[in-house]
Image: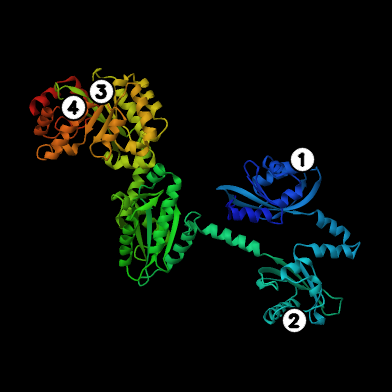
Amino acid sequence: MKKPDEIIAPNDDFRSLFKTHPSPMWVYDPETLHFLIVNDAALDLYGFAPEDFSAMTVLDIRPAAERARMLKAVETRTDIEKAERWAHLKANGETFEVLTYGREVRFDGKSAILAIVQDRTEVNAARRQVTDTRSLLDSIVDNLPVGVFVKDMQEDGRYILFNEACSVIVGRATEDVLGSTDRTIFPAAQMAILREQDSRAFDAKGTITFEETIQGLDGVQRILRTAKKALPAPEGSPPRYLLGISQDVTEERAFEAKLAYMAMNDSLTGLPNRAAFAQHIELHAAAATATAPIALLYLDVDHFKHINDSKGHAAGDTLLCQVAKRLSVLAQEGDLVARLGGDEFALVLKLAEISRAERFANQLLALLSAPFELDGVNEHVSCSIGIALAPEHTEDADVLMRHADLALYAAKASGRSTYRFYEPEMRLEAERWHQLSAELRDALAKNQFELHYQPIVRLEDDGLAGFEALIRWHHPLRGLVAPTEFIPIAEETGLIVPIGEWVLREACRTAASWPGHLKIAVNLSVSQFRHTSLLSTVVAALDGSGLRPERLEIEITESVFLADVELSLPLLRALKELGIRIAIDDFGTGYSSFSYLRAFAFDKIKLDRSFVAGIESDAGSLAIIRAVVGIGSGFNATTLAEGVETKEQLKRLKQEGFGEVQGYLLGKPMPRAQAEELIYGTALKRRIAVNG
């Protein structure tokens, strides 16, 4: 199916133009066949009321014999971009012949078809009757919607026919023109142009067609499309008469210009859009030289989704418009600023020297650091920028865009609110990432994952409280791939959901065979919380393994709340109602950990390892550790310290009253068999005795 090359947006200008256009037309949905919008000319022609059309489909205006043909035409698009003859029905049941022209468009963001109708009834009647009476022919010519004129070229181009449409176009009454010549009607400059056209028409063997802008005698400027032809004379005689047909296409050209603008410009910001940007970069990347380089900057507004979610899409749109204005102010003549979609912008800079790209990026970061006023409140945002240069990095536009995108990704990975120039290592890393993501998709099916279990120890009696389940990937060629390498890929590709389901099932199945007092802790990611099947997945894992809910601990980080607190809180409460224990992980590293403790009654607080590492020398870390003990007591939550690696750390945590610990001092993550040796043997007691 041909991609629509026009966009129709139902704004006031369009509705006015569409409504009053003299040609009957409508826009309909090719899926439902319902009319989406119908103009006045169509209402007059068919006799239906507007509310009738709103409940009808395009089949309802066709006789039964034509409907199958119409369905096939819609399905195969055989009536697109060409005229087709049809029989149609009026409201009174009358059948009449029409000529329709269809075109695929975008209407209200959806694919649609614009149909333009020409009523063939009068034309057919005229053909039958034209031989009967010349007066009828004169009447038809005079009432045609296009200008028709005839000149007698043997009498200095004297007008012998000048219909009403011509009168409107020129701005002079028909009776004032008939019998006159261009010399007496038009200014000298316009008269000379018309005479030259007439001469070309007489010299040509066929019809000549041209389009021009004229100043009518009424002072109105119009765009005319005119065809002229010398009428054949009796055999042996030279042509005498010149036939001209003129159509006022002023509104049509204005409409086309508006559609062309909409096709190449962003409707929200007015900036060039992705299509315009693609044309621009294709031209300028190929033309870039060492002495006249260009820089392509890709820019994303950091955490734009938070603005949309917290203040609404209208505020988000306002922010994007303000960003667009600031970018345009900073750009120089010859630069291009485009909006590619969402919060992504692109800039193409012409460089006198390469250093301008870096200066521009710094200026851009500074300019966007100033607050934006949204609904009377100052909001601060930042941006991430990726920069690629032509011809230094490449002369190919597509490759240049990929390089800029890789640099933007690197800027985001560097903490955002910064810029990065493209480096070849970025492409190599992207290729490695792509390869790893492809292999990750097969890992589940090929049973390449396994769980390791890190022991969690109760400090009250040095007993084993349970284990934290941690995934490992045994790659057939790469060996053991660290979770830090593949979990981010799983998050970005959505594979974290099926992988997380496997972890839950495997952890519950394994723990179900252990003594009943041992718990199993499983980390859940933001992506899993966004997935609607999480609750049923947890329930299925418990039911399938027979593990009691109170033996399962779900560990989450603050990012779960940042993603969507309205979704997260009800889900956490539903999990807790099942009897599952909920722990907040990496406590103390986020901005709002304390507020989340008030919002939800966590069963466990896991203190981040960074505070444990400083317990022996950093008074601030020790103060935070004591505060967490107090918080845990106040909220009736178990406190657990991660990352215990020294005897002194273990000793101090006992002294401060922490409930549980885990870390390399007490046991690294280990395979199931080794974990079960720890459960059923004396290894843990010996380790505590030695380290305690």
Is disc 4 placed on a helix, strand or loop?
strand
> Does residue 72 appear left or right of residue 105 in this picture?
right
> Does residue 505 appear left or right of residue 179 in this picture?
left
3D distance between C-alphas at marks 4 and 3: 12 Å
Q: Tell how many labels.
A: 4
Q: Report if the CB atoms under discs 4 and 1 are less than 8 Å apart.
A: no
Label located before the other in sequence (4 or 3): 3
Label located before the other in sequence (2 or 3): 2
Residue type marked 3: Lys
- Can you identify the residue that label 3 sits on? 519
Frontmost of labels 2 and 4 is: 2
Q: Position of residue 91 (x, y in %)?
A: 77, 43
- Can you identify the residue that label 2 sits on? 183
Which mark, by number, is residue 64? 1
Q: Report if the CB atoms under discs 1 and 2 are less than 8 Å apart.
A: no
- Can you identify the residue that label 4 sits on? 660
